[in-house]
Image (cartoon, rainbow, N blue to C red):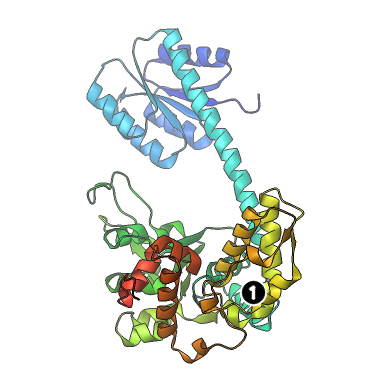
Amino acid sequence: MENKITVLVIDDERSFTEEMQELLQNTGFKAFIANTARQGLNILKCQLIDLLILDIRLPGVNGLDILKEVKGIYPKMEVIIVSAHGDMESVIRAMRLGALDYLRKPFRHVDFQIAIERTQKFLDLNRKLQVMEEKNSLISKSLGEKIERNFIGESQKIQEVLGLALTASEFPDTNVLITGESGTGKENIARIIHYSSKRKDNVFCAVNSCAITESLLESEFFGHKKGSFTGAINDKKGFFEVSDQGTLFLDEIADMPFSLQGKILRAIEEKKITRVGETEQIKVDFRIIAATNHDIDQLVSEKKFRLDLIHRLNTLHLHIPPLRERREDVEPLLNHFVSEFSVRMNKPHLKIDKSIVGILKKYQFPGNVRELKNMAERAVILSKGNLLMAHDFPLKTSVSSSGGSSNELLTMQEQEVRLLRQALKDHGYNQRAAADALGMTRDSLIRRMKKHNIRIKKED
């Protein structure tokens, strides 16, 4: 059999190892045996072993030390511990070190077969999961390669953004800053840069800087050692380590606490990190793509963001204009979203009334492309016939305009305050509904309300 499970038995009793080898081979396994730790480790170097059966007491060496060593080198290999001494403390330690099962000598053949069958089911499941993960990896890679081709937008402004993104992809070690209002598609542009670069076969790790509690930020970015703080029950890799050879996308970068910014800067400059609770440095190779919808220069002037960090992040700068400034993109985006949702919801024959495009082009879209996508999804869900009409796309007249808008005369901060207040009022001061309408999370809405000192009052 090509896919036989391979087993190694390490035990100082020759008669026991020979008996186990015969039993395993008769059961359909491929079996190797060793009577010393050194023999066993040499076999592990030469053979791909699925299952190790290990005596907890070996001449001149502690089986637990062997277990710890092999699990560190071969983490996917499963281990069954055997012992004639019934030392439960050692057994518990073995299980904590990663042993899958335990058998006490002498044991009956039937008990051994039950343990092996149980382990075989576990190994078979892991193999199936590995195959599925490989398939998903190939699918993800294929989707990544299609991102550029499926880029939606006909306006000159958005095509210029795409051109800059493709230029940035040619320099895989250069950091990029993407700015633009919420919902404009900053993460999509970041993915285009990653999947068009030499780093495309490695991780694209997307992190929302404001979605992590401040107390866990350092652990999440740098990782931690088991036991380094309450709740650290295992060693954990941080975002920098996970992104090694790939791309770390930092969304909402402006919301990162000032106290963490210096440590982030040092990691970017040195390409070395230290896990919380450890002293040893780990080399990492990552590319940073950061994004924000804030006026970053204003935050720097207000001493809320480090100037040296922005210089590191801002080697290349891409700004995505809001949808209201590129109205020619409304129609292709609408067609794309309606087509996507109609297929997904088994309504493949839906058509769009011509009047809708003209109406939507006059709308301000405070939530940008994300808001249009939400509109399309809602319209497809609630549609009764095969034609989407204007009433399927209810708009807030208070924020729509026939062309130019007085909003253009407002500062970004004044415009944001106005949109936040209007969205809250239109949705009965329901924060979640207002956030959905603006194309942002409820937590993001609350932070902006605090920033602008917006309180929920009916008279607002």
**Toward which corner of the image does residue 134 lie, by quadrant?**
top right
- The x and y percentages for residue 220 are 35, 58
- The x and y percentages for residue 438 are 48, 69
Q: What's the residue type where badge 1 is placed?
A: Leu
Q: Quadrant of the N terminus?
A: top right
State the residue in front, 57 or 300: 300
Using the image, determine if residue 35 lies above or below residue 368: above
Q: Is residue 380 left or right of residue 127?
A: right
Q: Residue furthest bottom?
A: 409
Residue occupied by mark 1: 360
- The x and y percentages for residue 222 are 34, 60
- Decide if residue 177 is in sight here: no
Residue name at image x 34 percent, y 72 percent: 449
State the residue in front, 52 or 162: 162
> For the residue carrying disc 1, how many other residues have a C-alpha within 10 Å: few (<14), some (14-19), or many (20+)?
many
State the residue in front, 431 or 10: 431
Using the image, determine if residue 86 lies above or below residue 155: above
- The x and y percentages for residue 94 are 31, 29
**Toward which corner of the image does residue 253 lie, by quadrant?**
bottom left
Using the image, determine if residue 19 lies above or below residue 183: above
Residue name at image x 47 percent, y 60 percent: 243
Residue name at image x 41 percent, y 85 percent: 414
Q: Is residue 436 left or right of residue 337?
A: left
Q: Is residue 55 left or right of residue 152?
A: left
Using the image, determine if residue 372 lies above or below residue 231: below
SS for dot 1: helix
Residue name at image x 57 percent, y 75 percent: 171
Q: Quadrant of the C terminus?
A: bottom left
